[in-house]
Image: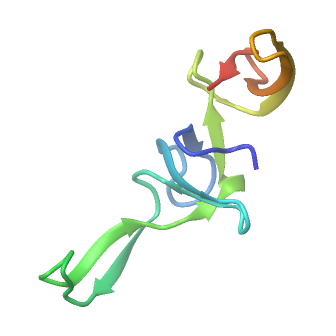
Amino acid sequence: MRVRKNDQVIVIAGNYKGKKGKVLKVFPETQRVIVEGVNFIKRHTRPSQQNPQGGIIEKEAAIHVSNVMVLCPKTGVPTRLGSKVIYDESRKRNNRIRICKKSGEMIV
């Protein structure tokens, strides 16, 4: 999976198409991500110490990674990701970095 936690993404398919948000959590084994402000579900909870009132709470649910695209940090448009190997002189070894296919900008 090329999408990582804290990436800025846009939803490209589904009910929330066009919404932008930050990736909060990644599930590589099921190929799903949780995006901030996208795909809300209602959860019925019992009273507990964290939530003494109980009741119905709304929270984000996971969506499939194929339904999101990473936003380029330079241009702000959805883009595909590639990788590039660069040599790090201070550590004396190769590092693999993610790059934006449209602008060639490095994605941190």
Give the vertical position of 52 relative to 35 (above or below): below
Left or right: where 107 falls relative to 92: left
Residue 76 point in image, percent of width and height: 56, 23
Residue 30 occupies which quadrant of the picture? bottom right
- Where residue 92 appears, as percent x and y from the top left, is 84, 15
What is the residue that sits farthest to the left in this orientation? 53
In this image, 59 relative to 57: left or right?
right
Please name the residue shown 59% across and 15% down the image.
74
The outermost residue toward the top is 89
Q: Is residue 46 left or right of residue 20?
A: left
Q: Which residue extends farthest front?
A: 91
45 above or below 84? below
Drawn side of residue 74 relative to residue 28, left or right: left
Residue 34: image location, x then y, percent: 52, 58
Instruction: Decide which of 78, 105 is in the foreground and name it.
Output: 105
In the displayed structure, 27 sits above or below 5; it is: below
The quadrant in which the C terminus is found is top right
